[in-house]
Amino acid sequence: MLSIPVLLGTARDGASSDIVAAYIHKLLVLRGVQSDLVDPADYHEKKTFEKEHVKPWADIMQRADGLIIVSPEYNHGYPGPLKEMLDTLFEEFARKPAAICGVSSGGLGGVRVAEQLKLVVNELRMCAIREAVFFSNVRELFNEDGSIKDPSYDDRCAKMFDELFWYANALKAAREKM
Amino acid sequence: MLSIPVLLGTARDGASSDIVAAYIHKLLVLRGVQSDLVDPADYHEKKTFEKEHVKPWADIMQRADGLIIVSPEYNHGYPGPLKEMLDTLFEEFARKPAAICGVSSGGLGGVRVAEQLKLVVNELRMCAIREAVFFSNVRELFNEDGSIKDPSYDDRCAKMFDELFWYANALKAAREKM
Amino acid sequence: MLSIPVLLGTARDGASSDIVAAYIHKLLVLRGVQSDLVDPADYHEKKTFEKEHVKPWADIMQRADGLIIVSPEYNHGYPGPLKEMLDTLFEEFARKPAAICGVSSGGLGGVRVAEQLKLVVNELRMCAIREAVFFSNVRELFNEDGSIKDPSYDDRCAKMFDELFWYANALKAAREKM
Amino acid sequence: MLSIPVLLGTARDGASSDIVAAYIHKLLVLRGVQSDLVDPADYHEKKTFEKEHVKPWADIMQRADGLIIVSPEYNHGYPGPLKEMLDTLFEEFARKPAAICGVSSGGLGGVRVAEQLKLVVNELRMCAIREAVFFSNVRELFNEDGSIKDPSYDDRCAKMFDELFWYANALKAAREKM
């Protein structure tokens, strides 16, 4: 059984990214994956960089076989609190795949933040995968109960999961042989 | 008289980036520029995004004719607290030039964080200039009194200032004509 | 009177980028700008890097006050022939603004190639401006006579021109004072 | 036995990148890897994009288990001829790891071109690895017989090979199970 947490980009933009992260998390669990939903708002304090403070996040990532980041795009880059979460750990990420989903209230779905994050997770020794889902016009995308209006997103997520799980299984097998 | 604040990337890596920012700030003042030194540590709290909380930073940037960012490189990107400072304002940055200096304890001087930051300040309607100074091996670069061991850095900073001031004056003249 | 050439990204993808470049070129001329349309296909040979071979391109850029690049996105980056055109000159670009338009047969309009090109033109001492127009789903966007189906693009181009001309005039005035 | 070709960035800058590529190729063979040295100059013509023309390159990449790119940095980006080589194939790259080495006549070793190339190979469904070797001041780095003056580069290459081979074996095992 794979373990793949979902890391939220930030809590700032109201409920939009939260809803996307919850949607992905639910689909992930339906695929039989163990998954924690991690919110930077739970860690975002001056103490961020103290080891003890981030222990829950470190433990989740230690046992993970991969990671999905769901992030809004702020000025073409990533939110500060998300970056602090990534800068806090190191060995926990190694040789695990990462998928990066963008969220945007506009029409371009956060593709630019995904590019910047790929370079960051690469430096963390993660393997960024190509497949991603971009949630454009996010404020109009979900019903009030959190279900998605456009069912084609289910298929896009499934395609991303397929690639992510392929890498997660391949790298897990290799890590266990070491 | 030009006004060009120096924005520090972060307070996390001990004194290294602080020393670089203070060094640049001093050279800037010697060139007859009005300059504030801005430290994200003074703003880094949950309240970051409240307008009232960041008013001092907004006022400094409002009257500025340009900006110098002095940032360490964390995992090939920018520190979270620096990004929060940039995401907090918008109109205050418009049509002003930005120079980006990298700081690194290794040999590559933070050139990668400069690339990511150029894309961010561009979206903030700033004009990123080409000239930059990269401070490699920063822990060995300064004397205890904050003076720099390698005097060639003075010339590199002068070259960066020349380009930054050229843009600052050109854009200031055009802004005032509007 | 401003002079702003339009540099086409590549000739490979059939007529799509050509049509976009011709559309922008036409709007530019209507705004009273002198403009040459430059096609890498006219230069793309082994001799590319010989000075004599690229003299027409060098002359155009020498007298230009800015540049608009219209490029398709190939694997998130820029086409090779476009990059060769940019790598061929240097001083001709200095202290002039550049606007970058993306073209895509998909829904994301080439925003990623624009990010990579901003870093390239920045190194060429150009000032990349924020405003850009992205032509998504380009194959359905134009009528057979080259006119655009969605008239909102005229306004988006006008907004990009306003910012580009503002910078072009500001930097031209400063260059002439030197 | 792994098969890992070395793709040269360009032939333009005299012998510098050639020498680096030959050096890496030799070390690779010493580690028992089958490796072809691929030079864009052999393909760089108007016909680049015709399938038949690039068949040798397609065949090499088809049987490869990974790729090492050795590229100079041109204006912070990749050379046009290298990009054409990458844009020519697609399925041949899928689910194989890529290591990217930068070459520079200056002190910063081509780290910026590596960042841009990571995003390109990611879109080609390759897995960019973190480990890389950057060859700064390349004109002073090699003896006339092609041997390297600074033996620490052997260790840096060994470290890069270790990570690349780990990924190459992990992904090969998974590809064969499909």
Image (cartoon, coloured by chain):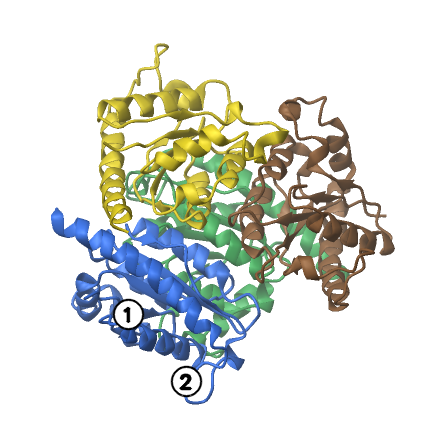
Chain colours: A blue, B green, C brown, D yellow
Determine the residue positioned at 35% across, 45% down. Answer: D128
Quarter of the image where the N terminus of chain A is located: bottom left
Q: Visible in this render: residue B151?
A: no
Residue B166, by quadrant, is top right
Q: Visible in this render: residue C115?
A: yes
> Between B71 and B27, which is closer to the camera in this rendering?
B71
Give the residue number, with chain letter if any, for mark 1: A46
Determine the residue positioned at 30% across, 64% down. Answer: A85
Say left or right for A161 vs C121.
left
Q: Which mark is residue A116?
A: none
**In the image, what residue type sits under mark 1?**
Lys
Circle 1: is it few (<14), some (14-19), or many (20+) Cα within 10 Å? few
Q: Position of residue B123 (x, y in %)?
A: 56, 60
Determine the residue positioned at 53% across, 48% down. Answer: C116
**In the image, what residue type sits under mark 2?**
Gly
Q: Is residue D74 above or below residue D151?
A: below
Q: Position of residue C107 (x, y in %)?
A: 58, 62
Say left or right for D76 vs A61.
right
Q: Is residue B63 above or below residue D5?
A: below
Q: Position of residue A178 (x, y in %)?
A: 12, 46
> Between A175 and B38, which is closer to the camera in this rendering?
A175
Give the residue number, with chain letter if any, for mark 2: A146
**SS under mark 1:** helix
